[in-house]
Amino acid sequence: MKQGRVLVFGIDGATFDLILPAIRRGKLPHLAALMDEGSWGCLQSTIPPVTPMAWTSFATGTNAGKHGIFDFSRMEGNRVRLSTAKDRKVPALWTLLSQVGRASIVLNVPFTYPPEEIQGIMIPGFDAPRVDRTVFHPESIYDELSERFGEYRFDWTFPIGKKFDLEAYLSQVKATISHRADTSLYLLQTHPWDFFMVVFSSTDHVQHIFWQYPEGRAIIEETYALVDQHLGRFLEAISEEVTVMVMSDHGAGPIRRLVYLDNWLAREGFLHRPRFTLRQKLLKRSRASLRRLLPIHLRKRLRDRFSGLKGRLEGVEQASAIDWERTLAYSYGMYGNIYINRKGQTPRGIVEPQDYEAVREEIITRLYALKDPESGEPVVERVYRREELYTGPCIDLAPDLVVQWRDYAYFTKRGIDQGEEVFGTELMVEASEYPHTGTHRLEGVFIARGPRIRQQQNLQARIIDLAPTILQILGEPLPSYMDGRVLQEIFDQTFPSSLPSGEKKDKEEQAFPETKEGVALSEEEEATLYERLRSLGYID
């Protein structure tokens, strides 16, 4: 017999740093009610708190060493490749539910493109490259929503290629949030489900832009208030037997300073630049100037015309910025990922296997000595060797070192066009005239309310704990490979403390449902996604 139903309401980037003060002022009444009636506390994200890893860890209950997605992109030879759901090596929560005949509706969850042919409905998140029938499962849902609501809106509230127009941008954000709520509520009320999940991503986007903008706090709080208003509509639409979870993939906060990590590696002697001729240096500087000064509409026209070359050109640029025959280590990705240029592991590796640990140790020691140029305080909280964070068959895809910056208030870039500077303060991205003043924090939010959820404050949970907890509520077997635990402390005494003997799954591998054929990213679509991600500083 089927047990329970679960609704997950995702608010991308939500933080109690904003929610709690707003509630004390009488705002966000629906979040306040859920917190008063249930369990709540901070939800620890992945390290680093980067979107693809965090959402995939939520969906699978595993660390990235098992599911295989570490960042927005990866280098493949001389080409930059964006991560997609096809790179995930472990079944998602909704995949497991499909295998036991439970229906799921999964809407706007990042990194669910291409969509899986699950039992139920799946519409991907902002990583969907286009709006057409092939992006929806089943395809008839596209027709159904289009007929009722007009053109479907993904959460593409990225400021890509836009002149600064505050009124127009905020109008777009409000329209997108309302569309997400209207379409999702319609599906919730008209289609069967045991597990329902929707994510509102615009909260994250406005925090990236407006955290340190003069009127930014009010703009962000207004966005939270609109999402809370729609949360109330969902709560009215469900029955009392449904367990409700509100969660975010990470928190948010201001950027204090930029760190150009490749430049620091170069300064410390771990990375070397090619010996450019004067002509090459002038061309490089000219390119950087054009990226900053060329009007947005011209940049967009050039990007659209040569989009098919984007991944190759970016890869060549990144590769050509380093003298590989003399480089011991380099950075790639968000938040301080450092790779050792190992012989046999990278195309032009020089670090011998017996020297690998010594190079890592020396980098770690020197990173701990890195100080903020203004305050003199250390900027590094901790440096992890990859095996300290990740376990599993995909660990070789992980960076060799992961830097946890102090409060994640330091945002990293490679610094290819920044001369020799290690620190910077220009909080802008080239793809937009909008500022880029906020970024992720390690602590997101978690709130749960349901028929057997007890009242509790200051809960400590991890994002990998939610998938096993949801399976427990639904009465379904827990795969033994999951790294997360069931949050038993949120349940009252009437809830079973464990599954009946023999119901825990022991298989390390699970069958995947088919993903939709013919929906792989084309070069043009990959270039479009690349610019979206760059507009929020996700890709350098």
Image (spheres, rainbow, N blue to C red):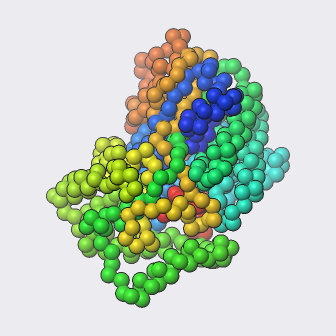
Tell me, yes or no, if residue 447 can be seen here: yes
- Quadrant location of the N terminus? top right
Percent position of residue 125, x then y: 62, 49
Residue closest to the eye, 376 or 531: 376
Tell me, yes or no, if residue 2 can be seen here: no
Give the total of numbered labels: 0
Residue closest to the eye, 127 or 506: 127
Residue at image point 34% right, 49% down? 378
Percent position of residue 31, x then y: 65, 29
Residue closest to the eye, 104 or 303: 303
Farthest residue to the left: give it.
Answer: 354
Residue at image point 58% right, 25% down? 448
Residue closest to the eye, 490 or 414: 414
Residue at image point 33% right, 63% down? 264
Instruction: Name the side, left or right, on which 300 lies relative to 189.
Output: left
Q: Quadrant of residue 151?
A: bottom right
Farthest residue to the bottom: give it.
Answer: 279
Residue at image point 50% right, 32% down? 42
Question: Can you say whether 126 is above or below 29 in the image?
Answer: below
Question: Can you say whether 274 is above or below 468 in the image?
Answer: below
Percent position of residue 532, x then y: 60, 60
Q: Quadrant of residue 429?
A: bottom right
Question: Can you say whether 142 is above or below 526 in the image?
Answer: above
Instruction: Name the side, left or right, on which 414 lies relative to 457.
Output: left
Percent position of residue 392, x then y: 34, 44
